[in-house]
Image: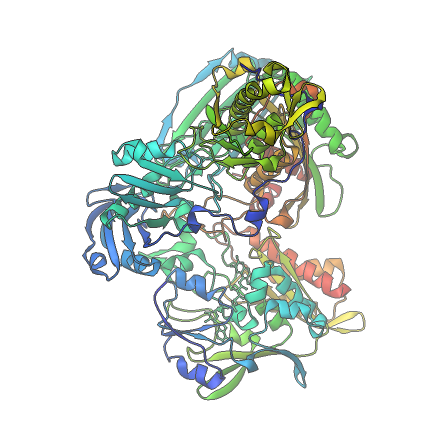
Amino acid sequence: MQAFEYASPATLQEAIALLGPKWGEAAVLAGGTDLISLMKDYVDTPKRVVNIKGIKELGGISKAAAGLRIGALVTFDEMLASADLKLYPAILAAVRGVSSPQIRNMGTVGGDLCQRPRCWYFRGGFGLLARHEGKNLVEDGDNRYHAIFGDGPARFVSASSLGPPLIALGARITVAGPAGNRTVTAEKFFVSPKSDSDREIAIKPNEIVTEITVPAAGRNATYEVRQREALDWPLATASVALRMKGSSVASARIVLGHVAPTPWVAAAAEKFLAGKSLTQDVAEEAGKTAAADAKALSGNAYKVQLAKVAVKRALLAAAKA
Amino acid sequence: MPEYRWPEMSQRRVMGKRLSRLDGPIKASGRAKFSQDINRPGMLFGAVLASPYAHARVTSIDISAAEKTKGVTAVKVTSPAGTEIQWAGTEIAAVAAATEEIARDAVRKIKVDYEVLPHVVDESDIQKAGNRVKAAGEQVTGDPDQAFKDADVVSEGFYGCPVLTHCCQETHGQVIQWQGEKIEFWSTTQAVSDIGPDLARNLKIPAENIHVMQEHIGGAFGSKFASDRWGAEAAILSKSSGGKPVKLHLERNLEQMIAGNRPSAWMRAKLGAKKDGTLIAWQSQSWATGGVGGGGMPPIPYVYTNIPNRRLNHSAVSTNAGGARAWRAPNHPQASFLTASAMDDMAAKLQMDPIEFFSKNAGYSARPETYRRQLVKAAEMIEWKKRWHPRGEAGAGPLKRGLGVGFGTWGGAGHASQCRTVIHADGSVEVELGSQDLGTGTRTIISMVAAESLGLPIQAVKLNIGDNRYPRSGSSGGSTTVGGVSSSTRKSTLNALEKLFELVAPALGAPAGELEAVGGKIQVKGNPAKSLTWRAACQKLGGKTISEMGVNDPKLAPKEGLNMGGVGGVQIADVEVDVETGVVKLKKLVAVHDCGLIINPKTAESQVYGAIIMSICGALYEERILCGVTGRMLNADMEFYKLAGAGDIGEIVCHLEIDPENDKRGVVGLGEPPVVPTMGAIANAVANAIGVRVPTVPLTSDKVLAALEGRNA
Ligand SMILES: Cc1cc2nc3c(=O)[nH]c(=O)nc-3n(C[C@H](O)[C@H](O)[C@H](O)COP(=O)(O)OP(=O)(O)OC[C@H]3O[C@@H](n4cnc5c(N)ncnc54)[C@H](O)[C@@H]3O)c2cc1C
C-alpha cells in the first residue's frame, strides 16, 4: 500500500473540500472493505484518504415523503435490522447475499454502490478495459465471470448487488459536491466506461453519495444464482418490481445483476410482461426474452441460462410476495 | 524391560475417551502463538519481489534505489541477470527493513528488465501441450486387446481434476535470526526435527547451529517440510543486517502461487466388463502437471489394482507454474476420483447398482473384506436401499437428488520417533519430543498416552514439543505422526515407570514387576491397600530424576504391534443438483473408515471432518486458475479461489470402525485416508442425480449445465 495522508472530517462540506478534482488524488473511505483491498493491490493509490464515517448526517434510515431514505453510511446489517426495509424484499435478498458477517458489519450502502469492479484483470492492474499488448485479456483470457450483455468496450460485471434492486424500485441517489446536492436515478448512476480513465459510476472525484431514496413499492423480489452460501459473488441475479392491476401485471421493472458492466435493465422483458398474469410459463418466457440479446464470451455461455432462470424465479417470488 | 503393549480396550482410563484438544481454548481465544505472531526485539521485516511473468529471462536488475531507501538494512538478489524464470511468482529479490511498510515500498523500487519467453500454463488438453509432454512409457498386464474383445460391455470416458493449492491459513515463512554462528528459527513447519538440517544444507553451516522453535502452526497439508528458498533468503537478510531477527512470511498471493500445489490429473479411460458386472479390462491414458518438473502420477486403477488386463499410459506435462508439493495423501484423491468415476460409469452402463458393482469387483483390491464390509455399512448409513435410484431417474422438478460412492486406501504406519520422559522428585512429569502438532491433536494424544501409562490425570503431564532440542521425532507427513509419537511415548513412559517401580519396590515389599500405576498411585497389582501416592513414590528420588527414552523404529514396529499401516475407507455422498442453474449442494456425506486403535475418538473424527471438508472444496469449488494470455494466476486470493463455507458443507456422518478386532492392529494414522474418497463420491452422486457425467471437477454451474446440454469436450 502506498503511504497516504489521512483525514477524518466531521462535516460533509469539509469532506468535499478535502477531495480533489482528479480521480486517484484522494479517496473516500466508508467501511473500507473494498478500498483497503484496492490500495493493497495498488489499483488505487490515493495520496489522501478521507474517512467519512464521522459525518453524522450520512447515517440512518428514515421515512420521508418521497419514500424511504437510507443514508450512505448505513451498513448491510443495519438494513437487515430495519423494520422499514421489510417492504423491500428485493433489497433485503441482495443484502443477505453478502453472506459474510464481517462485511455486513462494515460495508455500507454508499460503498456498495461505489465499489470497483472485481474483474481479475482490473484488479491485476490491467485497467478497466483489460487491454494488454494489443490483446483484450477478457476476450482472449479467462472470462467465466464476465459480462454477457453490453455493447461498449468494457466486459467486467458491475459488482454492486444493491444496484439492480434499487433500479427496479425506482430509487434515486443523492450526491453532494462543491456546487451542492444533486439527485440521479439509480439507473443513471451506473455507466459503462469507454476508456480506462473513465469510471463506472456517474459521480465526480469530489462528490460524495449522501443518501438513497426508495419510493413506496409494490411486489418486489430478487433472485441470486449462487455457487456457494459462503461469501461469494452471485453468478447472476435478477431484481423485479411489479405494479399489479388485479391479477395481471400493470408494469414491471426487471433488472439483471452481475451480467454486464452496469446493472442490466431487461426492457424487452418488461414490455412483454405488461398486461399478463404471472404464470410459470409467462415467467419462463420473460426470462427468455430478458436473455435474448445476450452475447456470451468464450467461457461464460452458462450465464445466459442463469440470467433466464434468475428472471423467472425472481418474478415467481414477487408474484408470491 | 517392560512389555510394550497397549492396555486392553476395557482397561483404558484415558485412552479411548472423547477428550477435547488441549490447545483448543488458547487457539479459540487467540492466545496461541504462531510463527507470524512472533515479534523479537529489534526485529526487521522482509518483503519479496516476485516475477510477474510465467516464463522470462531476467536481463538486468537494479537494486540501488531500494538500497538507498531510509530504513532498508539489506537487499538480496535471488534471481540475478541471466536467470530463466519458469513460473510467475518466482522470487527476484528480497529486502529487509525497519518496518513492513518500508520493506514493501523498497521492493517496488527495484527495477527489473525481463525478456519475456513463451509460456504453457494449460495442460487440460494434452494435444495442445506439444513438446511439454513426457511419456512415462506403456505398462501392459495380461492381454487387454483380447479382454476388450471378450467384454460384453465397454465404457469409455474422460475425467479430470485441476491443480489445487494448499491454502494454508498461515502462509509460509519464518522469523529468523542469524547472529554469529547461531541461528534462531521460529518456523511454520511440519518437520521441527528435520527442517534445521535442511536449512543448514542450504546455508552450508552445521545443523547443530540451528535452533528451531514452533508452538503452533496454521496449516501445512504437505507443503511445509522444507526450509524453502525464503528461509535461506531471510537468514541471509538477517546476517547482512548485523544479526537482527527478520520476519518474512509470504503474502497470500505468493502463498497461492509458489508455496506448493497438488498436481492435476486427467484421464481418458476405457473399461471392459462381463454382463454379470465382472471387470476384465482397463485401459487408460492419463496425464498430469505439477509445474515445470511435470510430476504427479496417480496410481490407477486405484484400489481395484488387480484388474487382470490393463494397458496404462501416463505422461507428465511441464507447465510454467509453481511446483507441486505433497498434498494430503499425495496422488490418492486424484487416482480415487478418476477410478471411481470411470467405474461408476461402467456400473451405469451395466445398469447395475454401484454398491453391488464395487463390491463384486473388490477382489481386485488388497483388502476385499474391508471394502465389502464398509460398502454395506455406508449404504446402511445413507439408507441406500430405500433412496438409491438408477442414474438419471431422480423424478420431476428442477432439484434432483443423487447418491454416489467413493473409496480409498492409505498406509499410515508410525514414523521414526524418540521420546524422553522425565520424572522429578516433586512428582512432576515432563514428556519431550521434537515433534509438532499440525492442529491435528498430536499434543492431546501424546498427553493421553503418557497419562494412561503413568496412571496420572492428563493435567499431570507436562508435554514439551515444537523444539528441535527435544529428542528427534519424524516429520508429520503420510499420516505417520500418531503411530510414531504414541509408540515412542508409550515406550518412554513405561521405561520411566519401570525405574520408578524399582525405586519404590522395597518400600512396598513387592518386586518391581508386581507393581502398577493407577489412579495417581503406585501399588501392588490389584491391591490398593499396599500403595504409595505418586508424589510419595517420587519423593524417594531424593535429588535425582528419572529420565528414560522410548523409540519407535518403523522397522521393528510391525513386530512390536504398537502401530501399523494399511487402511481402507468408503464414503457415500448425497447431493442435490438444481438442473436449471447447475448448482450442486452436498446434503449429506457418510464416511466409514478402518483405523486401528483410536486414542481419542473426538480428535480422530475431527480429522475425518476436516479431510472431507477439504475434498468437498475440491469436488465443488476450488481450482487454480491460470490465465493463458498473461501466464498469471487469476485467483491467487481467497475470493476467487473458492473454498466451502460452513453453509456449503452439508451433514457429515463419520463411522470409525472401533472394535476389538481393529484395535488389535495398534495405532494407524488417519489424517489422510478420509480426504481420498470424497471427490469421487460427490462426482458420482451428481451423475446419479442428473443422468450424465460431469467429467471434471470442480462441479461448478458452468460444467454441470454444459454436461446437461451435451456440450462436453
Ligand atoms: C469476497 C467478497 C464478496 C463480496 N460479495 C458481494 C456481493 O455479492 N454483492 C455485493 O454487492 N458486494 C459484495 N462484496 C463487496 C462489499 O459489498 C463491498 O466491499 C462493500 O459494499 C463496500 O462498502 P464499504 O463501505 O466497505 O466501502 P469502501 O471500501 O469504504 O469504499 C468502496 C469504494 O466506494 C467509494 N465510496 C464509499 N462510500 C462512498 C460514498 N458515500 N460516496 C462516494 N464514494 C464512496 C470508496 O472511495 C471506494 O472506492 C463482496 C466483497 C468481498 C470481499
Q: Is residue B592 left or right of residue B328?
A: right
Task: Choose top left, top right, bottom left or bottom right for residue B190.
Answer: top left
Q: Is residue B345 left or right of residue B122?
A: right
The answer to whether any part of residue B314 appears in the image is: yes
- Vertical order, B331 against B53 (above or below): above
Extreme residue in the right direction: A246
Q: Residue A280 in the image: x percent, y percent?
A: 75, 58
Q: Is residue B185 left or right of residue B563?
A: left
Q: How is the image coloured?
A: rainbow
Q: Residue B113 in the image: x percent, y percent?
A: 22, 52
The answer to whether any part of residue A272 appears in the image is: no
Q: Residue B115 in the image: x percent, y percent?
A: 23, 47
Residue drawn 25% across the image and 59% down it: B109
Q: Nearer the viewer, residue A15 or B334?
A: A15
Q: Residue B179 in the image: x percent, y percent?
A: 27, 44
Task: Choose top left, top right, bottom left or bottom right for residue B455.
Answer: top right
